[in-house]
Image (cartoon, rainbow, N blue to C red):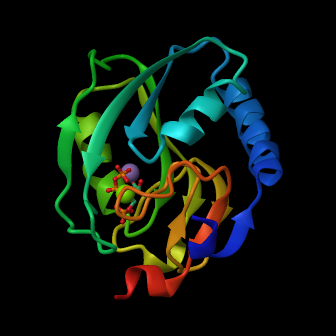
Amino acid sequence: MEKDIEEVLFTPAQLDEKITELGHQITKDYQGKDLLMIGVLKGANVFMSDLMRKIETSVKIDFMAVSSYGLSTQSSGVVRIIKDLDYSIEGKDVLVVEDIIDTGLTLHYLYDNLLSRKPSSLKICTLLDKPERRRVDIPVDYKGFDIPDEFIVGYGIDYAEQYRNLPYVAILKREVYEK
Ligand code: PRP
Ligand code: MN
Ligand code: MG
């Protein structure tokens, strides 16, 4: 684990501070609304559970599981829905919660898919954004940090399903995935 890490980008304290800010902003913006947070599994699991506890207005949650990377470091570009939402989102104020936007292909697919279900509003919150790598435009409403074009793990984010449990966000050593 630790031996595979090149550099820690955001410590638990830095993450907590930023997520508290995001939570305050979302609390203000969704006063009196019917906020439904949709976490994109598996990566957004950790961010989602910390963010929802920083929101001081009523919140419901649901999850979708999609995957485009699988065990690879490259996005396949083909997004598979592995688990769909439990309930309809028609008329709901939906906030999609992602851990990271890289090429944007996952959210591009998800955004259109969710929009077709007629929510009252649809916004996007991501902890991390890698703008250099974007292949399709994504309207990001809430963002934690911009990050450089490096392979990131931790705080929910994996490489081949590993490292999700690291409490910080870090750059993975190249030698780990370039074999
Ligand atoms: C990762 C990440 C985002 C997506 C971002 O998910 O959690 O959902 O890729 O990449 P993109 O902008 O290039 O589409 P992944 O497909 O690895 O599934 P996971 O969340 O289960 O790890
Ligand atoms: Mn994901
Ligand atoms: Mg992944």
Pick whichever, 1 or 135, lies toward us. Answer: 1
**14 relative position to 163: left or right:** right
Q: Is residue 141 found left or right of 87 in the rendered image?
A: right
Can residue 147 be seen here? The reply is no
> Which residue is more in the foreground, 179 or 120?
179
**Where does residue 107 sit, x and y in percent of width and height?**
35, 52
Q: Can I make out residue 114 in this image? A: yes
Q: Pick the quarter of the image with the N terminus.
A: bottom right
Q: Where 79 sits versus 134, above or below? A: above
Report the image quarter containing ligand 1: bottom left
Q: Residue at x 27, y 18 (%)?
A: 86
Q: Count up the numbered dots.
A: 0
Viewed as shown, does residue 116 lie left or right of 151?
left
Residue at the location (43% across, 67% down)? 102
Percent of width and height locating residue 32: 63, 11
The C terminus is located in which quarter? bottom left
In which quarter of the view is residue 177 placed? bottom left
Who's the residue at 21% across and 66% down the image?
77
In front of the other: 18 or 166: 166
The relative height of residue 148 versus residue 81 in the rendered view (above or below) is below
Please state the horizontal and vertical placement of residue 157, each as a whole percent of the image. 49, 55
Left or right, 123 with respect to 90, comes to right
**Residue for point 39% across, 43% down:** 42
